[in-house]
Image: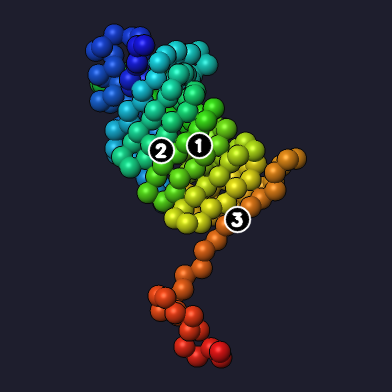
Amino acid sequence: MTRVTGVVGFFSAWAAVLLMAAVVPAAGLFSAPGGGKSQEPTEILADRLVNHAAEKYAEFTGSVQATQGNFSMTADELRVYYTGDLFNPQGSTAAPTEINRIVARGRVHIVSDQYIADADRMEYDPATDVLTLTGESAKVTSGRNYISGSKITLNRRDGKALAESGPATRVKAFLHQDDKGKEAGTDAPPAGKPK
């Protein structure tokens, strides 16, 4: 099975080097936490890549793995929508490439410093830093806590999350409380509280 990396796959090796060196690190697949474009390079592995130049998106299929710094994602399919010229060599006067939308489908699994997420579909908008997860099994886990629903919207810029139910699934939250007032192994109530 042949694997392709970067955003060019079947194109010549020099185009891949130019793209990975110039376009992807500058645009960044996912922004840094709290907004702003990540300066980390992005690596994408897949079985196949087709660039749709007229429609302005690159489509990766087959056991897709995308990694940028401490952020990683796997999916069956990944589409990267862009503006400008994807194969714009350095020094060209053509419009620079900007990634404006990312869509992943099929067994989407995301791992970051803040959370782990699973969904049937993921859409990311770099301009707003909003990540939207959909599917009856959409779930976001942080430590021992998690939320699930048919649609989960994470605003990474302001830290807000919205979970919505669907026809077959209600929103579920599983939250652990910190036992700051309890000593480990005792049932004593926190100081200042009646027994």
Image position, residue 27 (x, y; %)? 36, 32
Image position, residue 174 (x, y; %)? 57, 57
Residue located beneath label 3 in the image: 173
Amino acid type indicated by mark 1: Tyr
Residue located beneath label 2 in the image: 30
> Which residue is drawn at the image coordinates 33% and 36% (left, top)?
68
Q: Secondary structure at mark 2?
A: loop
| Res. 174 visible in picture | yes
Quick one: 195 or 43, which is closer to the camera? 195
| The N terminus - image quarter | top left
Residue located beneath label 1 in the image: 124
| Res. 92 visible in picture | no
Q: Residues within 10 Å of mark 3 (few under 14, many from 20)?
A: some
Give me the disc on residue 138.
none
Which of discs 2 and 3 lies nearer the camera? The answer is 3
Quick one: 23 or 162, which is closer to the camera? 162
